[in-house]
Image: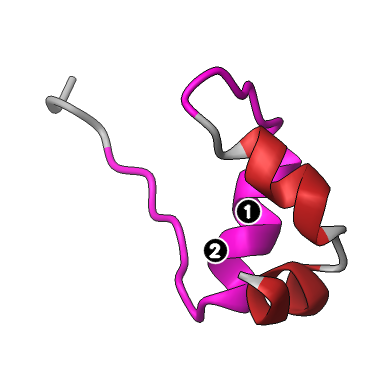
Amino acid sequence: MTKVATDAGLGRESLYKALSPNGNPELATVLKVMQALGLGLRVAAVKAR
């Protein structure tokens, strides 16, 4: 968790708090953590128009 927090540019304690069951992380925080883990986010339409 310490390495993920460092790589994401976040404090370890704030990362634990944001990802806790009662946490409410901002999208920016989630994206930073995903990037630190080498993950990406892709958006796709649910159904074609």
Q: Choose between 2 and 46: the one closer to the eye.
A: 2
Task: Tell me residue 40's x, y (percent).
Answer: 47, 66
The residue depicted at 71 percent of the width and 31 percent of the height is 26
Q: Are marks 2 and 1 in contact (CB under 8 Å)?
A: yes
Seen in the image, is 21 located left or right of residue 22? left
Q: In this picture, is 10 found above or below 47?
A: below
* Disc 2 crowd, CA 10 A, few/some/many (<14, 14-19, 20+): some
Any part of residue 27 in sight: no
Towards the viewer: 27 or 16: 16
Residue 47 versus residue 27: which sits nearer the camera? 27
* Residue 3 belongs to magenta span: no
Q: Quadrant of residue 25?
A: top right
Q: Which x, y percent locates residue 42? A: 39, 54
Say if 7 sits above or below 33 in the image.
Answer: below
Q: Callout 1, which amino acid?
A: Leu
Is 21 rendered above or below residue 36?
above
Give residue 20's position: percent from left, percent from top.
54, 33
The reply, left or right, for residue 43 in relation to residue 28 is left
Count of residue discs? 2
Query: Circle 2 — which element?
Result: helix
Q: Tell me which amino acid carries mark 2.
A: Met
Based on the picture, tell me whether residue 32 belongs to the magenta stretch: yes
Q: Identify residue for label 2.
A: 34
Badge 1 marks a residue whose secondary structure is helix
For the C terminus, give its image quadrant.
Answer: top left
How far apart are the two marked residues, 2 and 1, measured between alpha carbons? 5 Å
- In the picture, which quadrant includes the N terminus? bottom right
Q: For the point 61% across and 47% down, which residue is it?
A: 30
Which residues fall within the magenta stretch?
21-44
Seen from this angle, which residue lies furthest front? 13
Query: What label does residue 31 carry, if any?
Result: 1
